[in-house]
Image (cartoon, helix red, strand yellow):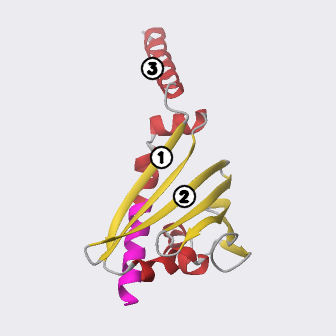
Amino acid sequence: MFKTIALILLALIACVLIYAATKPDSFKLERSALIQASPDKVYPLIADLKAFNTWNPWLRKEPTAALTYTGPASGPGARYAWVGKETGEGSMEIAESVPASRVAFKLDFTKPMEAHNLALFTLAPEGGGTRVTWSMSGPAPYMTKLMDTIVGMDRMVGPDFEAGLANLKAAAESAK
């Protein structure tokens, strides 16, 4: 009986591992929100890293994380790195910045897992406000595929994107 249960469990684990290996080699996660403020009001809250970190959902979870800013305050080359007990270690650098339209970031995680992704914010006028779309994409090595199979990348990170967009909305709409 024990042997049969162990074999069934082993077969289930093998199926999960094999299924994870068949997932795509890249991922993309995206959320959007309508903010009742012009793109000109929303853009500086994303393109200036210190302003970004006033609504950043992960820093709100761990406000004691150590931050180091380098380069210009905003625009391409602006960068910050963080070290935290809960948020791990990494850095984010603005790679592209188009005023009132888009900001692209190189996002590098070093701990607890190494990952190199692209985060993109697009701003589009909509109904007197701004539709902000926040996406993150990158390669999906096997461990990422396995985590996605077990936990789900969308379930793991999506709520943080939603919280961040709600924080950004509150900041932009109160700054009118």
Residue type for callout 3: Leu
In the image, which is nearer the foreground, mark 1 or mark 3?
1
Which residue is denoted by mark 3 in the rendering? 12
Q: How many marks?
A: 3
Instruction: Give the spatial CA distance, label 2 vs label 1.
Output: 10 Å
- Residue at 68% x, 53% y is 111
Which residue is denoted by mark 2 in the rendering? 119
What element does badge 1 sit on?
strand
Q: Position of residue 129 (x, y in %)?
A: 31, 76
Q: Among all residues in the image, which is located at the extreme right?
A: 70
Which one is earlier in the sequence, the residue at label 1 or at label 3? 3
Residue type for callout 1: Lys
- Is 162 part of what is drawn in magenta? yes
- Residue at 59% x, 32% y is 142
| 34 left or right of 122 in image | left
Instruction: Give the spatial CA distance, label 1 vs label 3.
Output: 27 Å
Residue type for callout 2: Ala
Q: Report crowding for label 3: few under 14, some 14 to 19, many 20 or more residues within 10 A (C-alpha).
A: few
Q: Report crowding for label 2: few under 14, some 14 to 19, many 20 or more residues within 10 A (C-alpha).
A: many
What element does badge 3 sit on?
helix
Name the mark on residue 28: 1
The region drawn magenta spans 160-176
**Picture quadrant where residue 87 is located:** bottom right
Closest to the observer, 7 or 121 = 121
Name the quadrant of the C terminus: bottom left
Secondary structure, magenta segment, majority class:
helix
Q: Position of residue 28 (x, y in %)?
A: 47, 46
| 70 left or right of 107 in image | right
